[in-house]
Structures are given as structure tokens and as C-alpha cells.
Image (cartoon, rainbow, N blue to C red):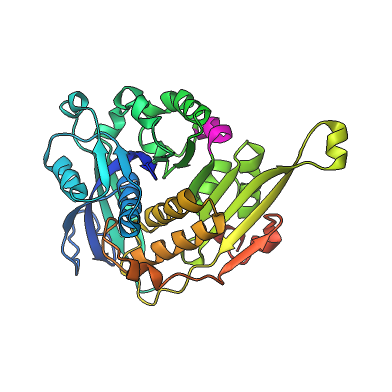
Amino acid sequence: MHNDVVEAQHQSFVIFIRNYWLGGIKKFPDWGMDELTQSPIKLMPGGGGLNSALILGGLQQACGSGSVELHSLIGYDKFGDVVRNRVHGTRVSLIYTEEAARRVSTGICVCFSGGEEGKMDRAFITYRGAMAAFNGDDLDIDQLQRVSHVHIAGYYNFPKMWSALCSIVPALKKKNITVSCNPQWDASEEWRGLADLYNDLDYLIMNEDEAFQLTRQAKLGDALEKFHSQGLKMAIVTIGAKGAVASIREYHSSEEDSKKKKNSPVVRWYWHKAKNVSKVLDTTGAGDAFTGGYLFEWSRSGDVRKALQMGCAVGSAMVTKLGASATLTLDDIRGYMCSDCLSEESAPSNSVLQHIAIGDE
């Protein structure tokens, strides 16, 4: 399991998970029974922070600039070695405290991937291990403050870090360091704490189900509106094969606002439709791949539209591979770039979003 703090462009991620990957599963066995899989069982590194960091680092290496730091906590065991071996020779630097690493076990996530044709899905069984102990004392704050962007990957996988983030994130903002976050699924289903960071986050990246749970809303337009009412500036929501939506709250002054000495909020949203993937092998890690692509483009250009395009292209390319941390080439990604797949609207209304969001169908 790997959830981490990632630094991009010089960037940082925070969280980490190790995966056993079981693919080709058509049904889960009943208790006392056995079920055959057509694919070999593999031990491979994975988890939100590591997956996104590897994508980001690979893109930076291909373009000849930037570096990534993965701040996390892994143990000195065979599962930790899998992670260390995976990042060796890449642009990703794995950063953790030696003392803490010697007293913890590396987290493990067993990933089940399969289903019938056209209905691929995943399920997970997770032992958090080191991530359950990961806290503010395990971070080198001075080092974090020397980067341009910090991404918090998998907020709900390291609850002991939450209180520290309430002071770390505002401190990063004071140094003009941009900050993003991905919540990942909250196994407790309480979905608490993250809203405390909204005012200081530059953007939150999540999938549609996470957006609905965080806001307790059933429609995407309502969820986006709720995020902005709670102080979030930008919400990035992936919607599977349909692509991704970005909703941005901005403030513009008008003559009337000047008289009232205030600015009026304006919400603008973008929808990038993903190109069709003819053969999906494994959807595990597609959202993490999207995040890595989005971080790469947003950090170098600041253009949300280009970042959505890159994120969708990388996510689409990833589902043609097996495993969440598979290596992608630029040729893999170029095949899914689509410059005319973007829609722009002045407000995220449910009527407009109805045909793209599962929650509105």
C-alpha cells in the first residue's frame, strides 16, 4: 500500500500501498470453495502515491525536466524491497525516516481485478501497516518547503497524519507552494476531516463515487456546488470511460461588487471526454494514472484544459496494461490525446451534466 506526499516539477506525494494483483477473475469463490483465474497471481508495487509518482516521473524523464519525491513510510521487509526496486533508476526519489522504517511493516493491498467483458471492476483487501502509523513526525518539513507543488495521495489511508496536515498545508501555501489532494476511499465510510483543508488546497482530485460520498450528494452538479460552498477552489472529478470534469470557483469584480466592497464568485467547468479504448485489460490504477498526467501538465502550464486532456490520455493508456504501476511510453499516451474532446460551460448545472455522470442517470 502506498499513499504518500509527492512533489512535482519538483513535486512531492504523501502515501503508499503494495499490491498483490489477481487478474482475470470472473467471480469470487464462496467460502470453502475454489475459483480458478486465467491470469498468474503477481506481486507488484502499487497504490495511489506510488502509481501517480511513477507516471509523473516518467513524463518528466521523457520531456527532460523535473523530479519527483515520494515521502512515505515503508518497512525493511520484502514488500518494502519491491517498492525500492520499482523506483530504482526512475526520477522518483523515495523518502522516509530510517528509524520509523525499522519498527513498521510495509502495508499490503490485495487487488482483485476482473469481471465479464465490458464490465471490468476491482475490489481490494488492505492491510495498512506502516500507513496506519504514518504521521507528521515522519515528514521532513524543510524538504517539503523547497518544492513547487505538493500532492497528498490517499488522505484516508493515513489518519494519524490528518492533524499535522492542518498546519502543514497552510504553511506550504504561505511559501507559495501549490497543494493538491486525492482522498481515496474511506474504509470507515465516515468521510470526515478532509473539508478542513479545502480553503488551502489548490484542487482536489477524486473519482465520482468519492465526490458523492464526500458531499453526501447524489448528483454531480450538486456535489460540485457543495465543494465550492465549503471553500474548495477547484474540484477535478474522474468519471471512468466518460473522461473527467473540472469545476473552478473564481472571483471577479463588477461595478456593483465594488460598491459593496466584495467580489462575486463565478464557477466555470470543463469536461474532457476520454477517447474510446478498444480493449480494456485492467482498470486498476487508471485514476492514479490520470492524476499523474494531470499533475504533470498542470504543473508546467497551469492550463486546466490541457491538464484534463493529458490526464485522460494517460488514464486511457493505463487500462490497456496489466497492473497499476505499469510503464507507459509517450507513444502509448499519444494515441489517446484528443484536442477536440473538451466542453466548456459557465456553470456545473445538473441538466448539462446529466448525460455524463452516473449519479444523474
Confirm whether residue 1 shows in the render.
no
Q: Find the magenta span and give its range.
A: 194-201
State the image quarter where residue 330 is shown.
bottom left
How many numbered marks have been drawn onto this rendered protein structure? 0
The dominant secondary structure in magenta is helix
Q: In what quadrant of the picture does the N terminus appear?
A: top left
**Image point 45% across, 74% down: which residue?**
276
- Of 302 and 214, nearer the camera is 302
Nearer-the-camera pick, 116 or 61: 61
Q: Judge left or right: residue 147 versus residue 210.
A: left
* Left or right placement of residue 68 versus residue 230 in this view: left
Instruction: Identify the residue at horizontal 59%, vertical 39% (top origin).
Output: 232
Q: At 20% from the left edge and 37% from the top edge, which residue is drawn? A: 106
Q: Is 220 situated above or below 67?
A: below
Q: Is residue 249 above or below residue 239?
A: above
- Residue 6 location (% of width, % of height): 36, 41
Residue 239, image x and y in percent? Answer: 50, 59
Q: Residue furthest bottom?
A: 278
Q: Image check: 344 left or right of 155? A: right
Q: Tell me what residue is drawn at x 39 percent, y 62 percent.
A: 314
Query: Which residue is more in the foreground, 99 or 92?
Result: 92
